[in-house]
Amino acid sequence: MKTEMNYVEAIKLAQRQVLREDEKTFILGLGASDPKGMFGTNLGLVEEFGDQRVMDAPLSENTLTGVSIGMAAMGFKPILVHHRLDFTLTAFEQMVNQAAKWFFNSGGKSHLPLLIRMVVGRGWGQGPTHGQSLQTMFAHIPGLKVVMPATPQDAGDMIVGGVIDGNPVIYIEHRWLHGIKSDVTQPFQRYKIGLARISKPGNDFTIVANSYAVVDSLLAARFLENKGVSCEVIDMRSILPWDKDLILKSIAKTRRVLIADTGHKSFGVTGEIISTIVEELWGQLDGKPLRVGFPDVPVPSAPGLSKDYYPGPAEIAMEICNSVGIVLSAEELRQLRGDGPYDIPRQGLVGPF
Amino acid sequence: MTITSVINPDDPISLYKRMLLIRRLEEALIQRYPEQEMRCPVHFSIGQEAIAVGVSAFLNNDDWVVSNHRSHAHYVAKGGDLSSFVAELYGKSAGCCAGRGGSMHLTDMDAGFLAGIPIVGSAMAIAAGVAMSQQRNQSKSITAVYIGDAAAESGSFHETLNYASLHNLPLLTVCENNEFSIFTPMSMRQPSNRTIADLSRSHGIKTFEASGDNVLEVVEVMRQAKNYMLEESKPAFIEFNTYRLLEHCGPNFDDDLNYRDPKEVNRFAIRDPLYIMANFLIAQNWLTEEKMSEMDTQLKLDITNLIDEVKLFDNAGYELSDKVFWVNL
């Protein structure tokens, strides 16, 4: 059954599905059942499942992670929720030392079905400690898995896939994706973690992107199509593990690549993928690999500071045009940047994608 | 060698036997440690055996234990498999963690010993989760977590006690206060105008304090704590005063470094849990010195055989594959 819905609705319905299907599943976290229901993603769930299945909690991120580990080791399937990724840094001990090593340390005798949802903030001055997109830090840790849904379908399928994966899964949602709409097939199906997808096929240039950068990339690709550059946009979907096969195959075909990531540019996803390209496709490219990411500066708050901080479709298109020798006019760049307020998702960006 | 005897809180000989097993096993490991075949850090429990045995005397197979870096006594007291314990220290593939964890990550799920968690304080949160699963399942079982005095300085201690108190989790926190975090004494870590037990009480948790030297005292306070937990369906906390005989990590004495009062060190001879219990059993005519020595000789022989056997096991082999850290469902 296909229904048009946004990303928030998809998360909510997918959680409802897993809560209905498996009584061992439960949601835990500060504000899990509050009146705003985690940006609407948990709305109505406590009413249907009660406060033992949708548990509000104290502000104790590290201990709640430990509690989730203990529950998961005993066969429960926790979905731990955080309003902002930045707060999970206080739980790094439990995520990195305990959850990530659990299966390994147990000699393979005990595993953790544990899904940890966290939201990356953007806009309205989120600033240095509410706007970080730190997928790289999680992806550095063997034992974790890291997914970043970019579409409503994936948002739902990754809830299902994350809950039954059996490993600690970091599920990073982007605040600006919450309003994205598309047709969604229900019931949600298991997303097998590690698979990327071609969001838009093309022949001249591969754009590898994740999370909100997929939206930026699709807009850039749409623009570039009119300039005669056919871009293949790949939605990574999973950061750890990442889909080397699909991504390298596309690059081998187009012989040109740009990586667009929502994290800081240095020591991150873009660097990892380009390193792999250098290792695996040495000498097969027609141009140097390009990358677009957050500047290596903490996320600023004030309008004057944050207006030009985030790269978008314009920066992606510009990099590609420079690389293939296309000159962009000021008017074209202005169009790509849009003319609405810079710190809320632009109207043109809600989809369907 | 497998543990066949059961610890019965009302049978002092059974308590003594298990303490002796822990002591002799650790002494045998200490003796062999310089051979450098056990290539992992070890934190010996010598001096702290009475707590583990007295606590475990009240734990059934479906009660869980979560422990810390100094976990040998907790593991053996709970009935953890001896062969896979020794094999883990020797880096064998038959080790309880397949050689991946070493002394600080012991586990025996069948015996109800979930894990050693060496990052101080973190075990508490995981234990609270295990306790919450027991509460959800409406079982009458409990989870005991062992911590040291320094855990009280970690955020996890307060977050977990707050959470356990809020939800009335069947969580028993057993604090083994040996006064030192590595070399650093309590006076440099915690204020003197409150105790660790006070912190627990301030979280609204029923809290007991006792000496951890005499296993019979441990048994009595543990009896009260367990009864309270079952009758009230609430968490409890016990702070034991105890003494770590050896260095923080390793098989040696480190008192040449003068970080402890020599009088305290010398006092160990009379506060040694094994010494106290042996004296008691002889004074009460429960055991003769002859019988005790016979028991000891047999035990040492069994342990030697166990270690010799384990040393012949296959060494754990290197495997660079995501199969070792991800389950594939």
Image: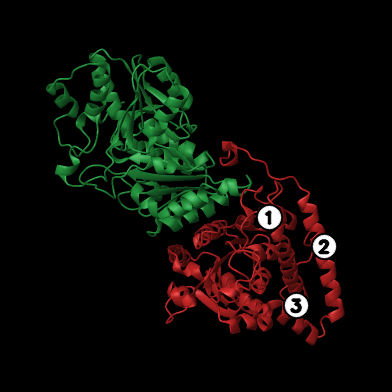
Chain colours: A green, B red
| Inter-mark Cα distance, 1 to 2 | 19 Å
Nearer mark to the viewer, of 3 and 1: 1
Element type where label 2 sits in the image: helix
Q: CA distance from mark 2 to mark 3?
A: 22 Å
Residue drawn where x is 19% and y is 42% of the image: A306
The amino acid on which the numbered mark 2 sits, given as a three-letter code, is: Asp
**Chain at numbered mark 2:** B
Q: Position of residue A171 (x, y in %)?
A: 41, 41
Q: Amino acid at mark 1?
A: Met
To which quarter of the image does residue A137 belong?
A: top left
Which of the chains bears the disc numbered 1? B
Quarter of the image where the N terminus of chain B is located: bottom right
Residue highlighted by disc 2: B302
- Foreground of the two, A17 or B113: B113
Q: Position of residue B107 (x, y in %)?
A: 64, 55
- Residue B205 at x, y = what percent? 48, 73
Left or right of B258, for residue A228: left
Q: Please name the residue that numbered disc 3 is placed on.
A: B12
- Quick check: do tags 2 and 3 share a chain? yes
Q: Quadrant of the C terminus of chain B?
A: top right
Left or right position of B131 against A326: right
Q: Which mark is residue B38?
A: 1
Which of the pair A60/A103 is nearer the observer?
A103
